[in-house]
Image (cartoon, helix red, strand yellow):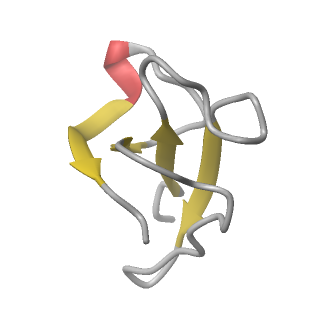
Amino acid sequence: MLTPLYLLLDRLLTIIASGSTQFEPLANGACVVPQNLVGETYMMLTKSRSVADAEVLAGPSVIQPS
């Protein structure tokens, strides 16, 4: 059985509109990007809904949703 993967989306200094870190399930290489992201957003691939070093598989990467 494959380990579920998650995409972590967060703002470093100004928290995203919802006020918290968001985790979106990644399935078949795709995920739904939340509509409330603005400005520089940091993205990481994790193997759980955690930002602990042991859970992060890749990133951070900076994206700018439009």
The image position of residue 20, as x and y in percent, is 71, 29
Displayed quadrant of residue 46? top left
Displayed quadrant of residue 47? top left
Instruction: From this view, report whether residue 10 is shown above or below residue 37.
Output: above
As rendered, which of 36 and 48 lies closer to the eye?
36
How many numbered callouts? Answer: 0
Q: What residue is drawn where x is 41% and y is 65%?
A: 65
The C terminus sits in image quarter: bottom left
Compared across the picture, whether 62 is left or right of 47 comes to left
The image position of residue 21, as x and y in percent, is 63, 32
Q: What residue is drawn where x is 33% and y is 15%?
A: 53
- Considering every residue shown, the one lying at the far right of the view is 18
Q: What residue is drawn where x is 44% and y is 15%?
A: 52
Compared across the picture, whether 17 is left or right of 32 comes to right
As rendered, which of 45 and 20 lies closer to the eye?
20
Instruction: From this view, report whether residue 53 is shown above or below residue 28.
Output: above
The image position of residue 33, as x and y in percent, is 56, 69
Compared across the picture, whether 60 is left or right of 24 comes to left
The image position of residue 39, as x and y in percent, is 42, 48
As rendered, which of 52 and 8 lies closer to the eye?
8
Q: What residue is drawn where x is 60% and y is 75%?
A: 32
